Every structure is written in structure tokens, then in C-alpha cells.
Image (cartoon, rainbow, N blue to C red):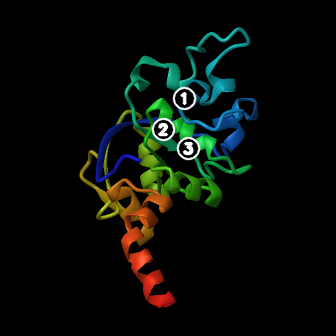
Amino acid sequence: MKAIEVLRARTVVLPGSNIDTDQIIPARFLTTTTREGLGRSLFADWRYDGQGALLPDFVLNRPEAQGCRVLVAGRNFGCGSSREHAPWALLDYGIQAVISTEIADIFRSNSLKNGFLPVVVDETTSSWLIANPGAEVTIDVASTTLTLPTGVSVKFPLEAFSRYCLLNGVDELGFLLDRRGDIEAYEQRRHS
């Protein structure tokens, strides 16, 4: 996992509410256990026509969306079934964070475990971002703040353990493996 301290990036806006994990990565693409290549299938039913050609009107296919690393979405992003493939597909595509007024709990948990940053903001901030696609925002993981190009900063919730993992580029297993010496010393003391 790659550490995230500060993310400065442009936004791409997908304002619909209740965007579920099957829309993010349709079930027919869940045949792999690796992350590589899943970005091609991100929003596949919205990005491609029946012959596999890109649909020019879909927001991610527009030239101004190229290079955007922050997705601004409507309420209840990532609802539906639990699948780690959803944050994997977003990351593989190049998106590193999603901003919404509400992010589904399981998607949020899967995201944090995989180095993808879910940012929950208030209605006012969300409305501004939706009305200003392509805005350059700054997400500071250490201070848990999102700063708009207007200079307005808002706090977002992020529990301490998730913040630690994001800042250090480790997942839960990596966190435990980093403490292997302490764990083995404890086990030795316990068995003595």
C-alpha cells in the first residue's frame, strides 16, 4: 500500500445518489483476486457501449476528467454488496479518494483497508464540489481536513487506526507484521 499524507488533486463529479458496488465494478468482472487491470472495468456499464467503445458523454470519458484523482459523488456512495474489487477498481483507474455526504459502511471499511480514502463532508461542501467539477482540492490525512480552492477547510471523520495505516502505507496485516518482534517477545514471556 502506498502512504497518503496529503493528496492535492482535481475532482471529477459523478453526482448521482446510491451508486452501488455493482455499478462501480459489475459482478461479471469479479473473477480475479488481483487488483491489476480492474480499472478498465470501473463503471463499465456506464463507460462503454455494447461493442466496448467508450461512451463520450460519460464523465470519466471526457477529456477534462483525465488525471483527476478525486471522485465527488452523490449521497450513499458504495452501497450494495460487499466487494473489495470496488476500491481496487477505483485505485487501479487512478482515483485515490471519494468525497460524498454519505459513504456506505462496508465500502468505507474496504476502502480504508486498501489505501483508498473515503471523505465524508457536509451538504454545503458537497454542493460546492458538485457545482465546481475539476476543482483542485487538498486532502490532508494527518489533520483530517479537506481544503477547497476557495480556502475553505472542513474536517472529515477518520478513526486513528485508519489514519495511522494511511499515513504509513500499511494495511492491517502490515501493521501486525511490523510488530512481530513485540508479539514474539510477549509469547516468549507468556510461555516462560
Any mark on residue 91, and which?
Answer: 2
Given contact means CB atoms under 8 Å apart, are the residues at marks 3 and 2 in contact? yes
Where is residue 169 shown, x and y percent of the image? 36, 53
Q: Quadrant of residue 9?
A: top left
| Residue 76 appearing in the image | yes
Q: Residue at x 49, y 89 (%)?
A: 190
Left or right? Give the position of 71 relative to 86: left
CA gap, disc 2 and disc 1: 7 Å
Residue sitting nearer the eye, 124 or 33? 33
Where is residue 33 shown, x and y percent of the image? 64, 38
Extreme residue toward the front, this view: 192
Q: As displayed, is residue 161 above or below residue 27?
A: below
Circle 1 residue: 39
Q: As displayed, is residue 107 above or below residue 156?
A: above
Amino acid beneath label 2:
Leu
CA gap, disc 3 and disc 2: 6 Å
Kind of element beneath mark 1: helix
Amino acid beneath label 1:
Gly
Circle 3 residue: 87
Where is residue 175 shown, x and y percent of the image? 42, 64
Sequence-wise, the earlier of marks 1 and 3 is 1
